[in-house]
Amino acid sequence: VLVSKDKERFQLLFSTIDCDIVSACRDLEPLSSVLRGHTGIRARHGQKSVVTDHQVTNLHRPGLVSGSELRAFEINWAGKFIEVDPTKLFAGGFDPRVIANPKILVRQTGDSLIAAVDTTGLYHLNNVHSFVATEKDNLNFLASLLNSKFYRYFYRLKTREHKKALAQIDIETVENMPFPQVSNAQQKEFAQLTDERDAARKEVNTNKIIYELFGLNKAQITHIENSDAARI
């Protein structure tokens, strides 16, 4: 058992190596220091009441209506529109200033993080979260971090929701993930990796850099890789 830094919650850990990895991250800044999360749109009379196949009025905006439209580093818009008439929506749920700017979209349902960068201003229902950078941080780097094997391992370690039927991604838990020190040069490395066409090589190189950023040793990396292979 380890007391976690975020709100002094208890975190159940069952191996020394897990304890060592979590302990090494305790003094790092939280992800919320560079990225803040927002929930999606909730309709007063059900989501179907605000979803259409075409743009009926200027209040109908292109939007994601299912988390399945999101894959790691990829958005597959299904062509649906969401009516953003305030009288039909619960308060909150979206901020036009957030939607209009580049952001990271994260699937809300699941036991691990699936993220992609959106630069097209897509709206989304509350089965998707949006995250915006607090500074001019590289969104491609932050998306790479969210999609990394290390974050998948660490998030599952924090939540213990792996393969649970109703597992959901919690914004606060994401914001409390550890954020490493990263230089501008290292962020540029990630920007260059986004142009890599070989998906397998891109994943290997991305994870390698992230392991280095967190200062993980060979045994810890092997443990994370083995845990990831066993749980997917």
Image: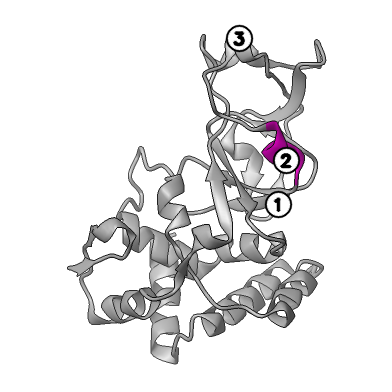
Q: What secondary structure do most residues of the magenta stretch adopt?
A: helix
Which of the two marks, 1 or 3, is nearer to us in this view?
3
Contact between labelled residues 2 and 1, with CB atoms less than 8 Å apart:
no
Kindly identify which residue carries mark 2. Answer: 76
Q: Identify the residue shown where x is 32% and y is 50%.
A: 161
> Relative to 92, is 199 above or below?
below
Contact between labelled residues 3 and 1, with CB atoms less than 8 Å apart:
no
Residue 120 relative to residue 183: left or right: right
Q: Position of residue 79 (x, y in %)?
A: 77, 27
Q: Give the mark nearer the N terminus: 1 vs 3.
A: 3
Q: Position of residue 41 (x, y in %)?
A: 58, 26
Q: Secondary structure at mark 3?
A: helix
**What's under tag 2, amino acid-wise?**
Asn
Kindly identify which residue carries mark 1. Answer: 117
Quadrant showing the C terminus: bottom left
- Category of crowding for the residue at label 1, using alpha-carbon neighbours closer than 10 angstroms: few (below 14), some (14–19), many (at least 20): many
Contact between labelled residues 3 and 2, with CB atoms less than 8 Å apart:
no
Mark 2 vs mark 3, CA separation in Å: 29 Å
Single out the residue that lies furthest toward the bottom.
218
Residue extent of the magenta highlight: 96-101
Q: Secondary structure at mark 1?
A: strand
> Relative to 64, is 110 above or below?
below
**Residue 188 circle label:** none
Residues 46 and 28: in front is 28
Figure quadrant of residue 1: bottom left
Q: Position of residue 45 (x, y in %)?
A: 52, 9
Q: Identify the residue shown where x is 20% and y is 71%.
A: 14
Kindly identify which residue carries mark 3. Answer: 87
Q: Secondary structure at mark 2?
A: loop
**What's under tag 3, amino acid-wise?**
Thr
Residue 36 relative to residue 8: left or right: right
Count of all numbered marks drawn on residues in the image: 3
